[in-house]
Structure formats: structure tokens, C-alpha cells
Amino acid sequence: MSTNGESGEEQTLELRDVLVIQTKDEKQLEFEVVGLVEDEENHQYAVLYCENEDEFVVSNAKGDLLEDESLAQEILDDFFVLAEESTDGASGGEEAK
């Protein structure tokens, strides 16, 4: 993530930002921010996707990967539900009553 020359102030991730993550086996993977999520306590998270690996990860708003796998999975599950609902709503069709 680029800080655009600003110093001393951490940037928060935004949609379409790209985060390069180095894996334990020294590979560098590019993950794009595809969603921003906020929980009930106003904690902000970013959902990132790597097209080459077809893999999602979750980070905090600053780009630090979540170490709590169950929390990350919960955020991903919520993200997928919201994404599915928005896709259904975008079709323009109404459900039969």
C-alpha cells in the first residue's frame, strides 16, 4: 500500500487498494480490497481477495492480517451474505408475494 509521501500518519485501507502479503514460503501475493466491514463495536475490517490464488483474507483497517481465525471467518461469512443480498437486490426483480 502506498502512503503517497505522507509520513507519520497511518493510512486506512479503501476499496480497490492493493496489499502485498509475503507468505511463509517467501511468495509475494497481491490482495485487493473488495469489501470494508464494521462490527457492532465500530471495529473496521477489510476483506481482501487474491485472484491468482483464489483466496480471501481479512485485515484490520490498517492492513494487519487478523490472527484470530474464527473472527476472520465470521467477518468473511457476513461479507458473503451482504454481497449475496446486494447482488440479489441489483437484479431488479421482486420476489413473488
Image (tube, rainbow, N blue to C red):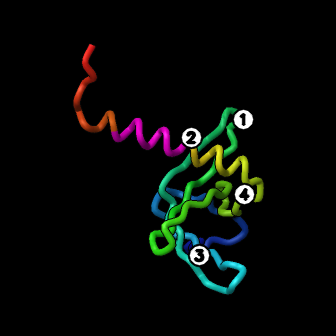
**Nearest the eye: 53 or 63:** 53
From mark 2 to mark 4, how far is it between C-alphas? 16 Å
* Residue with the mark numbered 1: 41
- Which badge, 1 or 4, is on the more N-terminal residue? 1
Q: Are marks 2 and 4 in contact (CB under 8 Å)?
A: no
Residue located farthest toward the top when viewing the structure as drawn: 97
* Residue with the mark numbered 3: 20
Residue at image x 63%, y 62%?
Answer: 11
Please say if 75 is above or below 16. Answer: above
Residue 12 belongs to magenta span? no
From mark 3 to mark 1, how far is it between C-alphas? 28 Å
At label 4, the amino acid type is Leu
* Magenta highlight: main SS: helix
* Residue with the mark numbered 4: 66
Please say if 61 is above or below 2. Answer: above
- Which badge, 3 or 1, is on the more N-terminal residue? 3
Q: Report helix, strand or loop for mark 3.
A: strand
From mark 2 to mark 1, how far is it between C-alphas? 15 Å
